[in-house]
Image (tube, helix red, strand yellow):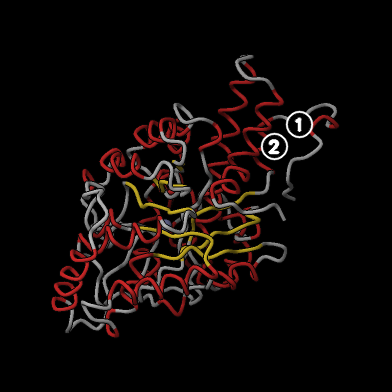
Amino acid sequence: MYEILSNIEGMNPPISIIDLANSIELTDHHCHGVEKTNLERADFEIIATESDWPEPNGMTIFDSPVGIMMRAECSGFLGLPKHCSPDDYFERRYELGQNKVTQLLLPATGIKTFLIDSGAPPVNTGAEVRQESSAFSHNSITTFKEMAEITPGTSAYEIVRLESVAESIAHKTSAATFANDFAAALATAAVHALGFKSIIAYRYGLDFNPARPSEREVVVAAGEWLEATANQPRPRMNHPVLLRHILWEAVDYGTAIQFHVGYGDSDIVMHRCDPTQMTEFLKMTVDSGTSITLLHCYPFIREAGYLAQVYPHVYLDTGAAAHWTGLSSATIVAQSVEMAPMSKVLFSSDAFGLPELYYIGTLVWRRAIGSILDKWVQSDGLGYQDAVKYLNWMANDNARRAYRLLPE
Ligand SMILES: [Zn+2]
């Protein structure tokens, strides 16, 4: 059904850009695993939003932009009429079971290559960590290897979350050995990781001091952090000096580093997640060999587009923003190609847990980018061959360049 575009010259008559966008294989450069247990209604309602709270007053997430899209676009896969009721949708979904719904929807996304954020908190729903009392556990989420197994012919790679690596050594390190222990743990993780991810936006803000901390500062900071978290079963890496230290350690690898930007759950302070607040860090890493990929970016998509134009190692996507905004997502995808060079825009679903989010994330991006490029071609502002090339870049090749992922 989905295919890599090749031999465009041989297409006669040429396929419309809209049809191509609907049928091209995708490289999803940032997403998470799928939930494996059959979710109860309350759990489904909370995983289908970034809010930490259920809809108030007995209302339902099915009346949010993403819920409306589920009932319109996923219902057919479940054997339901379009625009079915929330109760009918959920009842059918529950009856089929989570894994069956995943088997129906995930192959329909056309994602050929998954780059999976394997951040390992016990509870995680997409952008960040949920409250520990939540019903979801890490063990019920597919690993990156299991993701590839769900759809034959796909491949999956791991993106390692820096803060998770630091948290994994908390109970077996000391202030004096933290730097060495973290370096060793990161080296082990890097053996099988395609890139790293930073959630410094969550743990501090993107207005962090860009300077690399000195060895002495790291020892002092590690002492403070270990003391503050000594009694926590799962220490949370939130020390501003150590957050910078682990980031710079990742820069040394010269691979890609993903940054959570903008939109996220109630754990973020939105105005501190504007990516222009890390401009100085971007300046300092221009020649590092690292690709910086800005994730989600909502509502700072124009700011991210500006950074992607000015700094050669910066890329952006509209993952999560696209599926959460549903019918309004075309505006957001359009902003991603306002300013950034076509070689800097990436596709991601940023889906987590629900197979519906992978399907809707791909569907709305395909529709939006197809419509935008087609409009440009129809107005004769863009040549057809260039439009096909740019579509291919954004769907696959830009991610392959940013992550140095060789064609299969
Ligand atoms: Zn994510």
Q: Quadrant of ligand 1?
A: bottom left
- Pinpoint residue 335: horizontal percent, then vertical percent: 43, 31
- Disc 1 marks a residue whose amino acid type is Ile
- Residue 314: which quarter of the image? top left
Relative side of 266 to 115, left or right: left
Relative side of 43 to 76, left or right: left
Q: Are marks 1 and 2 in contact (CB under 8 Å)?
A: yes
Mark closer to the chain start, 1 or 2: 1
Q: Is residue 288 above or below residue 132?
A: above
Give the residue at x 17% y 68%: 221
Res 372 visible: yes
Res 250 label: none
Q: Closest to the observer: 76 or 134?
A: 134
Q: Is residue 110 above or below residue 88?
A: above
Element carrying mark 2:
helix
Question: Gap between marks 1 and 2, in whole Å?
Answer: 7 Å
Res 68 visible: no
- Pinpoint residue 179: horizontal percent, then vertical percent: 30, 71
Q: Residues within 10 Å of mark 1 (few under 14, many from 20)?
A: few
- Residue 121: which quarter of the image? bottom left
- Disc 2 marks a residue whose amino acid type is Leu
Q: Closest to the observer: 196 or 147?
A: 196
Q: Is residue 371 above or below residue 118?
A: above
| Mark 2 lies on residue | 20
Q: Closest to the observer: 249 or 311?
A: 249
Give the residue at x 48% y 75%: 38
Element carrying mark 1:
loop
Res 15 label: 1
